[in-house]
Amino acid sequence: MSKLKSRIEFILKYVPLLIWGLLNERQQERARMLYRSGTKTWKQFRGNLGGMFGLYVFVFFLAMAILAPWLSTHDDPNSPTWARTNPVYAPPSLDYLFGTDYNGKDVYSLTVWGARASLLVGILASLISIVIGTSVGIAAGFFGKISDEVLMRVTDFFLVLPWFPLMIVLAALMGRSFNNVIIVIGITSWPSTARIVRAQVMSVKEMGFVERARAIGATDFHVIRKHISPNVFPLIFANTILLIANSIFSEAFLDFFGLGDPDVISWGMMLEEAYNYSAFSSFAWWWILAPGGCIVLLIVAFYLIGDALDEIFNPRLRKR
């Protein structure tokens, strides 16, 4: 244990110094600016009580997802032998913290394992949405004219279509798969991001430093990479947090309607089974409360974090 501790201390002490020594002066100055900016942002974020509460809740569920094999009462929740000796519909007790379901499975362990799927869907689906929405928004806002018209009409088409029915249709056509759920949520939730990014890009590209970069012969790719993207990134980051909350709810929505992967334990799948096996009429409230409460709590946490970041990155909100 002492050897491991000393190795960790060595890595934390000398590896950053080694990396710093490999940077040139310009890169070191940029690193200092990023550090100062990050420190300032973190100080502002800490002053937001709602944002800090959301961060604590997110860290709690993230730790739950990572440590699921150790926190759960069973290392394989899908094992058919797991619930054979457990009572059916047992209420919460010291033996079964969140009670048991229709098959005798421990709802606590199902809830712990379900955190993995819900967070994974939320993060991966949001990344797909952000990549598509950011690409469309930057292309439309920066190049304008024909590109703007075509891309925005496509965006409007997706905005006009009812969001949930579109997800249901796509998920039904693609089949019940965990990967398909991620893809469906990602490709149906990008239009709002494209609109937000486009508006920000149109504002940034008219600024003086962009005009100067163009005057000295900078290419469009260079301007986008060096000047447009850094100024749009804070807005994208704040929007990503909100999209994760939306993706978690969408995953639970699709699972509840029987369009999720039945072999993957998630909070939405738990609610679907609770409905199918009449947990409501059986008064097995614990089977509904555990996954439903986690979904609501995690979504609220992400919205609080996103609201705090939006207040930091949007000076107009700070003045109100």
Image: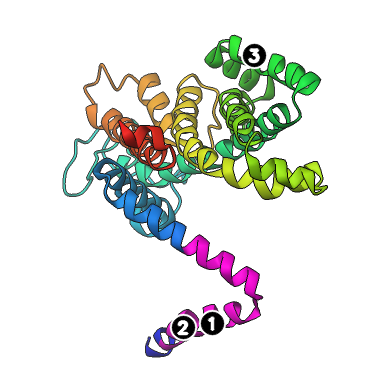
In the image, what residue type sits under mark 2?
A: Lys
Q: CA distance from mark 2 to mark 3?
A: 52 Å
101 lies above or below 110: above
Residue 54 appears anywhere in the view: yes
Q: Is residue 103 visible?
A: no
**Does residue 126 appear left or right of residue 53 in this picture?**
right
Q: Nearer the viewer, mark 1 or mark 2?
A: 1
- The residue at which mark 3 appears reads as 156
Categorize mark 1 by other alpha carbons within 10 Å: few (<14), some (14-19), many (20+).
few
Amino acid type, residue under disc 1 in the picture = Leu
Residue drawn at x 43%, y 30% is 268
Query: Separation of disc 1 and disc 2 at Cα?
Result: 7 Å
Which residue has dot 1 on it? 17
Q: Position of residue 255 (x, y in %)?
A: 49, 26
Of 76 and 305, the residue lying toward us: 305
Specify start and end residues of the magenta stretch as a single range: 6-35
State the count of labels. Answer: 3
Q: Which mark is residue 13?
A: 2
Q: Residue at x 58, y 19 (%)?
A: 167
Taking 113 as reference, is 224 left or right? right
- Badges 1 and 2: C-beta atoms under 8 Å apart? yes
Which one is nearer the viewer's eye here, 4 or 89?
4
Q: Is residue 200 within the magenta segment?
A: no
